[in-house]
Every structure is written in structure tokens, then in C-alpha cells.
Amino acid sequence: MAISNVNAIEIKQLTKRYSDFTLDGIDLCVPQGSIMGFVGENGAGKTTTIKAIMNLIHMDGGEITVLGTDHLKLSRNDKASIGVVFDGSNLHDNLTINNVNLIMKNIYPNWQEKVFMDYMTRFQLPQGKIIKDFSRGMKMKLSIAIALSHKSKLLILDEATSGLDPMVRDEILDIFLEFIQDEEHTILLSSHIISDIEKIADYVTFIHKGKIIFSESKDNLIYQYGVIHCRREDVASLDKSFVVGIRENSFGADVMIRNKEAFQKHYHQHPVDKTSIEEIMLFVSRGKESI
Ligand SMILES: Nc1ncnc2c1ncn2[C@@H]1O[C@H](COP(=O)(O)OP(=O)(O)OP(=O)(O)O)[C@@H](O)[C@H]1O
């Protein structure tokens, strides 16, 4: 990881209203040279955020810059330096790999035919078949290979690894890690597979019901958050500013706390256990705020 002070993506106060959902004035920065994991349950607002970044939907408020340029003013060349993969292929069913190569050569000024063909071999994608006859995982691999074959500086991946088997996912995560070895390259990766995020992300942003709950470095997150186990009646005595979520069980209550070090100074009687990104998400999504 070679993170600079520049942000590859900067979102300020992004608001988008649908009839039954609001993306509520969110702020998000993705530092250049890093991998940002973007997590949240179904319908939390990840794809809406990504569509707003790519200017695919009208925003009701806010500002976004991508690679230093207002996202509404990105030139063709600017757009060519962004590789985007959504869940599912948007390539025509009747195309073969050779057809895709020819089409991309015309679309992208920086198209790297050899890099693309090497990925086809590495991902074992068949030259003769049309895309209609590809499996879901094969289509995902093809989309990822395209995103990696036009000298992108920024990759935006929405659930891009979800249809892949664990071996291929692992290989692709290694490719993503290789990709950001250069200070200029950045990845925004939305995923439900938290183990993938834990493996490769430098930063994690958690979105819940259209609001950003946290956006911080993965190391900080694991270091700053923790779980205590106490009696239900003890919960009321805790300073609310430390409490992220509470889960009751037959023995008492588990409480997810933030700002672990400060908490430990105030409450020596409650040892704090380590936690994981998945557990933090569960406490926020399914836990209570107070008893
Ligand atoms: N075009 C639309 N019209 C109305 N509502 C929409 C539209 N697009 C998205 N939504 C709503 O916005 C909310 C957020 O959807 P979004 O696709 O951003 O979630 P997500 O976090 O990507 O979810 P998932 O993990 O299931 O892909 C949902 O309630 C969805 O129904």
C-alpha cells in the first residue's frame, strides 16, 4: 500500500431521494493508492452511490470529484481511465472474446490487447464460445479483465467477485493487490463477502439505510472497536457515546463499543474482546441502541 494525500474519489453531501429510500447527505473519500471496501446490507445504498459517482443517475444534492475532476465534467479520456464492473455483464450475448477485444480497441484509447488476451488465458475463458454460453462467473471474469486492460487508474467494482468460486476470487483479489502496488492506482470495491474486504482493503466504509456509519482504516477499525459481555442492568450505566449496538442473550448483554482505549480507562471492570468488521456490521444492523 502506497497511499498519497490525494483522493481518487471525493464525495461531499451526496443526496439521492427515491420514493422509499434516501441517500442522506453522505461524505466519502477514497485515498489514491488504496483499496476501499464498501459494505452494507442489501438496499443500503452502495449501488446508488456508485451510480452517482459514475454520473449514471441524477443527484438531488452534493458534489463528487473523480481523479481530481468534477464527475459531471469528465472527458472521454478521463472516463477511459476508470474501470467499472457492475454485478452482471452488459456485453451483448452473441459476442465472442475476439469480438469483445475488437470493440474495446475502438472504445478505449489505451486498450492493451496483449494484457487482455493474457487474462483470457489466465482466467481460462474459451475463445470460441459466445457470451450467452458463459457461466455467471465467466462473465464476471471477462468484465474484470476488460476493466484491467485499458490502463485504468481507478477501478470501481460493485459486487464484482460475488459469482466467483473461492479459488478464482482469491486469484482476483491478488490481482487487485498487484494493481494498487503503484501509487497511482485505486480501487473502490463493494462486496457482501466481508472476508474479501478483510483480506485486501486498506479502508472500510459501512453504509446503513443510506447513511455512512463509519469510513476508516481497517486497522483502526479493528483496534478501536470491541465487544464487552455484561449483565443487562449494567448497560444503562455505560456512557452512550461508546455504545455502537447491544445484543441481548439469555446470559446478559453483548455490547459493541467504539473508542476502545478511552472506554478501558473509564470501565476497568469490563474487559474488551476483539471484534471483526462482520461483527460490527451485525451489531449496527441487528442490535439495539439501548435496552
Ligand atoms: N431507480 C430506482 N427507483 C426507486 N428506488 C430505487 C431505484 N434504484 C434503487 N432504489 C432503491 O434504493 C435503495 C438502495 O438500493 P441500492 O441498489 O443502492 O442498494 P445496495 O446497497 O447496492 O444493495 P445490494 O447490496 O442489494 O445490491 C433500495 O431501497 C432500492 O430499492
Image (cartoon, helix red, strand yellow):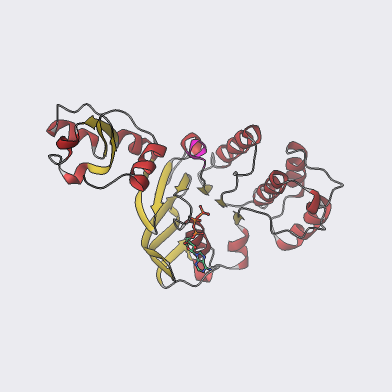
Residue at 18%, 31% (x, y): give it: 264
Between 174 and 231, the residue placed more toward the observer is 231
Q: Is residue 84 left or right of residue 201?
A: right
Q: Where, by quadrant of the figure, is residue 89 drawn?
A: bottom right
Residue at the spot x=42%, y=43% of the render?
Answer: 203
Q: Position of residue 190 (x, y in %)?
A: 51, 49
Q: Is residue 275 left or right of residue 116?
A: left
Q: In the image, what residue occupies the spot 52% across and 69% down?
A: 57
Q: Quadrant of residue 170?
A: top right
Of residues 234 and 91, the one nearer the viewer is 234
Q: Residue at 55% across / 37% down in the picture?
A: 177
199 left or right, relative to 255: right
Query: Residue 17 occupies which quadrant of the picture?
Result: bottom left
**Looking at the picture, how far across and down is residue 275, in whole percent?**
35, 32
User: What range of the chain is rendered magenta?
Assistant: 193-197
Q: Nearer the viewer, residue 124 or 77?
A: 124
Dominant SS type (magenta):
helix
Q: Is residue 132 above or below residue 57?
A: above
